[in-house]
Image (cartoon, rainbow, N blue to C red):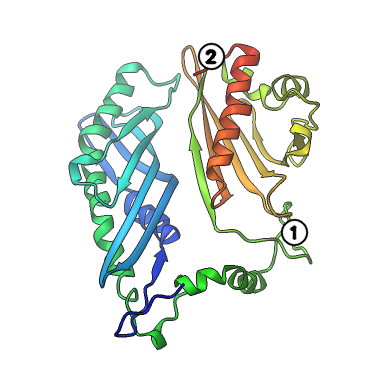
Amino acid sequence: MVVNNPNNWHWVDKNCIDWSRQYFKEALVGLESTGEAATVAVSDLTSVEGDVEVCQRKGKVISLFDLKLVLEFIGSTNAATSKTIKGSITIPEVAYDSERDDYQFDVSVHSNPDVDNQTEEQIRALAKSKLIPQLREKLFQFGVDLIKVHGSDIQLPAEQVKSQYTKSNQLQKEKVNTQIFKKSTPVSIDGSNSSSRVPKYNTSTLHLEPVFNTSADQLYMTLLDKERVAAWTRAPPNIEPKEGSSFELFGGNISGKIEKLESNKKIVQSWRLATWEKGHYAQLEISFHQGSTETKMEVNFTGIPVGEEDAVQSNFEEYYIRSIKVTFGFGAVL
């Protein structure tokens, strides 16, 4: 619906989530802090989840956003024999009404057998004392820059409104999407060109970090070995631990292709739910970080259709994480 006021101004909402992902990547990746004994730097932005809109309400341009961010960092000692360790920083809420001191930061250091506990704590402390203050300032600046970049075309005379994000255009979403499809060359799951049209979604990401009371090698094989997979899925799977092989789980409700394997360290898959449009695959990357008594399974989805995030998360937590823990006794079930 398009709402006109007496001056013939249009009410326009802009979805800015894609711009926001790029903004945070440029603003946060590369931030670095150096202490007496170590250096810490943000190496990657692995997840941005939530909603970002710039809109006009009663003649005033405002922003509405509520986001969760996950960053990866690398820490290294400044000694002659430098040691390196990786970790993550989770920011559970970046909201339009957040003040500088409202942001919370969960700093997690991935265990490395070559790095002692004292070095781990030095790097964790450096991240908290010097890197987080930089992140806090960048996050607070986001709302200002969001309005500066996207606020100028929110309130325009009707004849000047060309944004694809107007409410009238949102009602024609299928027509707009069809035009977008025709502009791109589709790519099949194996990366080759396809003569058929591969559906395009607006997509989102998902990041999880469940912990299991087992070793990385046991957890790695639990996700690939046919007999083990049959045990926790409660159904005969079609899977083999081989790069380039296709797989089907839960009677075909989940399917995809194993793209890359790093023994006991990483699994990368093209992954889809049967209910998604034919030809659309998300990417699922699972990394294993083994500690002294447990293993953290770092789960990163990219390419999830917008609106499907909750379904993917709840099903993955229930039918992957919880089922594996119950079946093999790999940890407490909450």
Q: Which residue is mark 1?
A: 192
Q: Nearer the viewer, residue 7 or 46?
A: 7
Mark 2 and mark 1 lie on one chain; the one further toward the N terminus is 1
Q: Which residue is mark 2?
A: 331
User: Type of residue at label 1?
Assistant: Ser
Q: Nearer the viewer, residue 260 or 55?
A: 55
Q: Nearer the viewer, residue 21 or 134?
A: 21
User: Please, which residue is most extreme toward the bottom here?
Assistant: 159
Residue 82 seen in this snapshot: no
Tell me where residue 222 appears, x and y as whole percent.
67, 22
Q: Is residue 107 left or right of residue 196?
A: left
How many angstroms separate mark 2 from mark 1 (CA)? 41 Å
Q: Is residue 325 above or below residue 106?
A: above
Tell me where residue 60 appears, x and y as whole percent.
24, 69
Give the image quarter of residue 201.
bottom right
Helix, strand or loop at mark 2: loop
Mark number displayed over residue 26: none
Q: Is residue 214 above or below residue 149?
A: above
Residue drawn at the location 54% of the way across and 35% of the way down:
299
Q: Is residue 174 above or below residue 272?
A: below
